[in-house]
Amino acid sequence: MSGDPWDGPAWDDPELTRLAERLREAHRRVAPLPADDRRRLIRQLLAITDLAKRDADLAARRLDAFLSGRVADFSSSPEAR
C-alpha cells in the first residue's frame, strides 16, 4: 500500500462536478432553517444525492425542482436577509 495521499478520482466529469457543487450549495442554504424544516429538506437532498449515484441527469432535474419549489423557504431564512 502506498503512502501517497488520495487526490480524488482520476477522472473529471464537469457535469457531475457541477451537480456536486449545486448539492453542496443546497445543503448550505438549508442549514440555517428551523430544525423541523431543515430535517425534512435534508432528507429530500439526501435522496437526490443517492439518486445521483445511479442517474446524474435525473438527479439534476430533481434538484432543479427541489430548488425552485423552495424559493420561499430560502428567502425567509436568516442567511437570506
Image: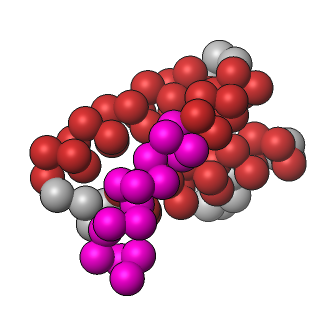
**Eyeballing the image, is 79 above or below 41?**
below
Residue 63 shows in the view: no
The overriding secondary structure of the stretch rendered in magenta is helix
Return the residue found at the far front: 72
In the rendered image, residue 46, in percent from the top left (x then y), is placed at: 41, 33
In the rendered image, residue 32, in percent from the top left (x then y), is placed at: 27, 66
Q: Residue at x 53, y 60 (%)?
A: 25
Nearer the observer, 18 or 4: 18
Nearer the observer, 9 or 49: 49
Q: Residue at x 24, y 49 (%)?
A: 38
Return the residue found at the far top: 54
**Eyeballing the image, is 13 above or below 53?**
below
**Eyeballing the image, is 34 above or below 16?**
below
In the rendered image, residue 55, in percent from the top left (x then y), is placed at: 69, 19
In the picture provided, is 48 more to the left or to the right than 74? right
Q: Residue at x 69, y 58 (%)?
A: 7
Q: Is 72 included in the stretch rendered in magenta?
A: yes
In the picture provided, is 12 more to the left or to the right than 51? right
Boundaries of the magenta span: 66-81
Choose top left, top right, bottom left or bottom right for residue 36.
top left
Quadrant holding the N terminus:
top right
In the picture provided, is 59 more to the left or to the right than 81? right
Return the residue found at the far bottom: 81
Q: Is 32 included in the stretch rendered in magenta?
A: no
Choose top left, top right, bottom left or bottom right for residue 5.
bottom right
- How many numbered discs? 0
Q: Residue at x 48, y 54 (%)?
A: 71
